[in-house]
Structure formats: C-alpha cells, structure tokens
Image (tube, grey):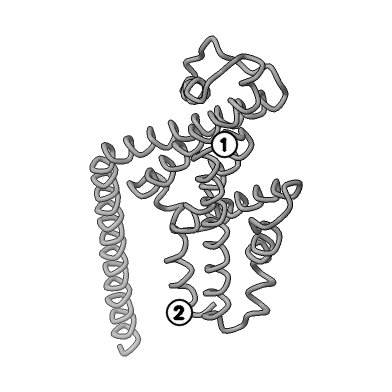
Amino acid sequence: MDARSTRTAERLNTPMLIAAALTIPTVAITESRPGGTLEDVAIALNWITWTAFLVELVLMLWVVPDRRTWLRRNPLDLVIVLFTPPVLPPGLQGLRVLRLLRLLRLLRLAQLSREAFSLEGLRYSLLLTVLTVVGGGAIFNALEGDNQHLTFWDGIYWAITTMTTLGSDIYPTTTGGEILATVILVVGIGFVALLTGAFAQRFLAPEIAEVEEELEEERLSAEALALRELRGVQEQLQALSLAIERIAKR
C-alpha cells in the first residue's frame, strides 16, 4: 500500500475495532430472543456493523493502488461483506461471528503492540473487557437461563465474578457455558495483566530511563577511554618511526 492507503487504514482501525466488537452483544441479544426493544437494538446493531465493514471495503478499494493485490492480502474483508449480510436466512446468521476475526488483525499492528501498556492500549483492552462482560453475560443467560432460572443481570454478575476469579454460586451446567466461562476467564486474566504492566511501566519508567542514561554514559566513557589509548599508541608508533628514520640516516 502507498502512503495514502496506509493513512486510511490507520484511521479506520478504531471504528472497525468497535464494529467487530459490537458483534458480541448483537449475537448475544439475538440468541437470547428477548423480543421488544432489545431485539430491535440487535437488528440495528447487525445492520450498523455490517455497513461499517462494507464502507471500509469500498474505501480501501478506492484508495489502494492495486485492488487485486490488496484483496489477495486481505480476503477476510471481502468474506465478511459477502457472507454476513443481515438479509441472510436465520439459519445462516451464525456466520456473523466471522466479523470477530477482524479483531485478530490488531495483533499484527506493530504500533498497537508498542502501545499495549499505554493509555491507548488500556482503552482497547477495557472496551474488549466491557463488551465481553455484557456479551458473555447475555450469552450465559441464553445458555443457562432456562435451566437455572436466571435473569440478564444474573448473567452479568456471573461474567464479572468469573472474569475477576471471585467465583459465585452460579456456575455453568452445559458444554457451551463451560466454553464461555473459559473465554471470559482468559479475557479477564489478560486485562489484569495489561493493567498491571501499564501501572508498572508508568511508575518504573523514570527509574528505567535513569538506568539507561547511566549505561549510555558508561558506554561513552569506555569509548572515549579506548580512543585516548589508541591515540597514545599511535603517537608512540609515530615517535618510534621517527627514531628509526634518524638512526637509519646516520
């Protein structure tokens, strides 16, 4: 990609992250079949997220210098637009989870990797964590609600206690619930690790910078000393060479 298409892709990263993450509550609400306003919200979110992917695809195809090469390197963008439209029959609506694969692209962004422990990195992880709590709670309620007579807020409470490893008297009884619990637990541990790393980097940054400065000063001092020694050796060799020439002339 050229500079223009690279700038466009970078500007679209955050909106597309949000669009991909919104797939979680959309699927959760749809699968729980609440009816009424919530179901209307799920339908609207479904259209909004798919439209976002369509707009991204059109914009990138417009700005990239070689469309065929870009599509070959980014096939997921085309697959999401073609295979996850909201007009699909109910039996194929499960393909919407393909939109979540868009989140994996963030793992390949060097800039985000460098900023993982920064404030921006925490914002991304916090957004993912909140969406995981809401979406995970809704999905857990859809999977376990009938068996355990749970409400939506019971699902949220279960997701929070699972993510923070506090535990509660609510636990999964189905295979789907156990898989969901594992995913939520991993996300929670990852967020805590990022939060700890960010705090450590923030408070230890001055000490690390000071140590780096001291090491740099020591390196420069060692180089200066070696340079002085080399100059001394060079001067001695020159003096020896002059002495030999004088002896030879006699």
Question: Where's the C terminus, which quadrant?
Answer: bottom left
- The amino acid pointed to by label 2 is Arg
**Which residue is labeled 2 in the image?**
4
Determine which quarter of the picture holds residue 208: top left
Q: Is residue 28 left or right of residue 41?
A: right
Give the percent coordinates (x, y) of residue 128: 47, 41
Question: Residues under labels 1 and 2: Cα distance?
Answer: 45 Å
Q: Nearer the viewer, residue 236 or 50?
A: 50
Q: Nearer the viewer, residue 98 or 1?
A: 98
Q: Is residue 176 left or right of residue 191?
A: right
- The amino acid pointed to by label 1 is Gly
Placement of 164 over or under 4, stated as above or below: above
Determine which quarter of the picture holds residue 127: top left
**Which residue is labeled 1 in the image?**
35
Q: Secondary structure at mark 1?
A: loop
Q: What residue sits 47% from the left and 52% below the top?
A: 18
Placement of 43 over or under 132, stated as above or below: below
